[in-house]
Image: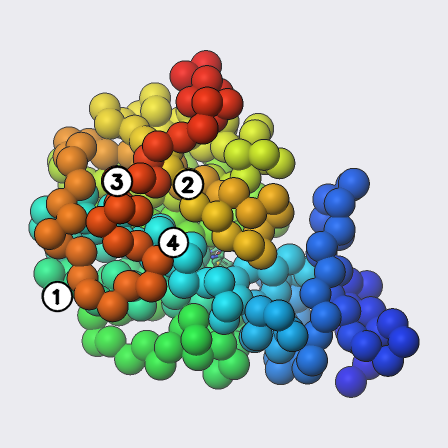
Amino acid sequence: MQPQAAYLVEDNGDLWLTEDEREHMKLSYRIRDVLFDQQSAYQHVMVLDSYDFGPMLVLDGVVQTTSMDGFIYNEMISHIPLNMHPEPRNVLIIGGGDLGAAREVCRYPDVGRVDLVEIDKLVVDACLEYLPDVAGHLKDNRVYYHFTDGVEFAAQCRSDYDVIIVDSSDPVGPAQALFERPFYQSLHNSLKERGIMVCQSQSPLFHRDVLGQAFGAVKELFPVSHLYTAVVPTYPGGLWSFSLGSKHYDRLRPAMLVRGTRYVNRDILHGCFRLPEFLQQFIASL
Ligand code: SAM
């Protein structure tokens, strides 16, 4: 199949995906097969079968999640807030079109409703069809899909949710506004009086500005704010951050952790909040 974009290149008969959105660093993955390749109204959506990471979702040439390591990120963005809130009935997921986070949230029997707000239906369709290790065959009648802009959706919510998870792509294109203060204010307004939000806040090594903007806004808006980290091999530099804001609760409830997780356990629940010195100093400066 002829490569459809500059970041998918044939080299000596091999097909390579090269993430080249960084000025001084490129990440390349050898590709076995192109499983899905379409342009939506928002982005170039591909699912590529890679040698080392299996099938991977790629949006505008940037790897979003893979069969090999998607579980790390999807468990970390879901189980931490769901083990801090004692009764997470109503959950909002913004982004999350690969359905990995939604699958983890649906493991909790207490959850009664999940509103998933994904701007691009093509991502959901592609992942259900070609990325079963991440999307599964999510047929859970608690999940309600809204194919619209998460910024607009959150702006019209009022105290509706116990937990909000912002599982966004990188801060470019439609995802840019998901890293700005007005959006975090909307999230605060959308949470019930004891609600908890978490968002992926990029790399503490390569995206310090974005992390500072996101966590700085969370720290300003919420009485309880924590940064936690995990290593996701396919993200630039590996180390990745999550910004959590809570209106009330500030204690983890490991007894609530459901069985069958592959990354999160009681040690991780507590340990992920322990930060290296450079990061502690950075967030203290915000
Ligand atoms: N787990 C991956 C990560 O951490 O990079 C990404 C998860 S998912 C693929 C990110 C999703 O956010 C994409 O499907 C994208 O279409 C969606 N998205 C981007 N901007 C959005 C917006 N303004 N409203 C709703 N969804 C948006």
Residue under pointer 1? 109
Q: CA distance from mark 2 to mark 4?
A: 20 Å
Q: Is residue 231 above or below residue 273?
A: below
The mark that comes first in sequence, 2 or 3, is: 2
Classify mark 1: residues with Cα within 10 Å, few (<14), some (14-19) or many (20+): few
Residue under pointer 4? 94
Q: CA distance from mark 2 to mark 1?
A: 26 Å
Is the CB–ligand 1 distance for label 4 below 8 Å? yes
The mark that comes first in sequence, 3 or 4, is: 4
Position of residue 253 measured from the top left corner of the image (x, y, whole percent): 13, 45
The dot on residue 38 is: none
Number of callouts: 4
Residue under pointer 3? 270
Hey, which quadrant is residue 85 in on the image? top left
Residue under pointer 2? 229
The mark that comes first in sequence, 3 or 1, is: 1
Q: Amino acid at mark 1?
A: Pro
Q: CA distance from mark 3 to mark 4?
A: 25 Å
Classify mark 4: residues with Cα within 10 Å, few (<14), some (14-19) or many (20+): many
Whether residue 260 is visible: yes
Q: CA distance from mark 4 to mark 1?
A: 21 Å
Helix, strand or loop at mark 1: loop
From the image, state whether disc 2 or disc 1 is nearer to you: 2
Left or right, residue 153 beside residue 253: right
